[in-house]
Image (cartoon, helix red, strand yellow):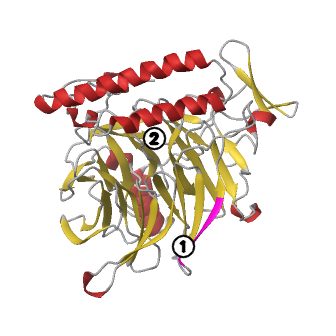
Amino acid sequence: MRRPWKHPTTARHGAADLCLREVGLLLPRRFARRAAASEDLVMRLQVHRKLNSHTGCVNTVGFNADGDTLISGSDDQMVMLWDWDTGAIKLQFHSGHSNNVFQARFMPYTNDQTIVTCAADGEVRLAKIGDGGDVPTTLLGDHDGRAHKLAIEPGSPYIFYSCGEDGLVQHFDLRTNTATKLFQCRNSLSKSGHSSNIHLNAITIDPRNPNLLAVGGSNCYTRVYDIRKYKWDGSSDYPSDCYCPPHLIGNRFVGITGLAFSHQSELLISYNNENIYLFPKNGGLGPDPKSSVKIEANKGSKSTIVSSGEDVDRPAPLMYAGHRNCETVKGVTFIGPNHEYVASGSDCGRLFIWRKKDGKFLRAMEGDECVVNCIEPHPHTMTIASSGIDNDVKIWTPTATERAPVVNIEELKPRKRRTKLWHFSLPEELIFHVLASRRRRQAAGDDDSSEDLEDSTGLLNLVLRAAERDVLSDEDEESSEDSGDCSLN
């Protein structure tokens, strides 16, 4: 029988910690970290400031190591460096990209002078801040399709990785400004003998073991690679481990939009049209889950994992539910000095925060007129930066005089959302994705072409109706309620 995994915790009280600190039984630094993780601070978060200078959706936000500077990138192809406390722009420059900037990050130990970016044009670029504020950019590599995310090797001013919709993972070394194509993530071989690429949306590195790299995308599995064991010739795809909730194994209708490792090497996975799941360290299914693991449904809703002919009693991952993740590629993150909380954006325009140890829902904060995509924690304090479809960045600090009331997730009221999210300037791009989805289904072994054609025709009609609605909404921009409301899945 599978038992839910419980995060190891020890009960503690703020007043007791204060007494221990005063008598020398608790180090001041540890006391400060415990105080910074207080749930009371989470319940007092409110908007401290709005950083409003971009002219497009803000797709990426991030703090520097000191926490005094925030970096943001946008659909306007600009990168901005902010004094987030005062709202002043320290520096802004054109990224060099020809399309939406998806991620911008400071490289460690470079005095915040070296920045790497990736974008919808598929390019990965390097920006070096020179004297006088001049910022030349250099093309380091590219993907065949959009490049969604970068992963910086912890503590390294030179090494980082990128992933893109072509399924390619690349390694970059700024000492030589070279890109190495590590591997192409592919789905398992289909009946036809061909394999299709996984469109990668997320990549992250284990901070306790920088040799472990996790990627996820248009597939139910998060794949973890040990770079030390990999042949750097780009020939094939051999993960060291795979992670997936038991009920989603083999599900071709879900994908992964966000990944994060905790300080304890736990792996957090956010699925589209599904929930968020937290796996303990070494809680994967093995390198080849389809051949080595199967799920035998029996005894009602219970299931048994069978691996190599033996029953494996793996704890079920913790689940965080209530948000909605259908319309965009949303990240997921940990909050708190010891990663005590989990946070995600939602299609309803709210920021959701859960307690990590038990999955309890804590807050749902109004963060965007349409969708919240990015949430980035401050490296030292209970401060959060968020962004989404709006053109601004919101800074959240625990400065509210009153605690937010406790709200059951079922009691969240639907929100009215602006219609600009539904503006499709290029419906043919959506049609392309519909046809690509059909090809992926065929590659996965679905030979019922008539059913595929019927499904694709229905989806194409839906896209065309959405495009027509876009034209009508240009004439009438009244607010409307739609399916983006949050609900308990």
Q: Which residues are magenta?
A: 177-182
User: Which quadrant of the figure contains the C terminus?
Assistant: top left
Q: Is residue 344 above or below residue 378?
A: above
Q: Residues within 10 Å of mark 2 (few under 14, many from 20)?
A: many
Q: Is residue 180 magenta?
A: yes
Q: Position of residue 83 (x, y in %)?
A: 24, 68
- From the image, tell me which residue sits under label 1: 155
Between the residue at mark 1 and the residue at mark 2, the CA separation in whole angstroms equals 28 Å
Q: Is residue 336 above or below residue 105?
A: above
Q: Of the residues shown, which amino acid type is indicated by label 2?
A: Arg
State whether residue 325 appears in this view.
no
Which is more toward the observer, 168 or 214? 168
* Comparing labels 1 and 2, the label whose residue is closer to the camera: 1
Q: Is residue 42 above or below residue 104?
A: above
Residue placed farthest to the bottom in the image?
131
Tell whether 319 sits left or right of 386: right
Which is more toward the observer, 321 or 92? 92
Residue 355, numbered label: 2
Q: Position of residue 251 (x, y in %)?
A: 62, 28
Q: Position of residue 244 (x, y in %)?
A: 64, 37
Q: Is residue 357 magenta?
A: no
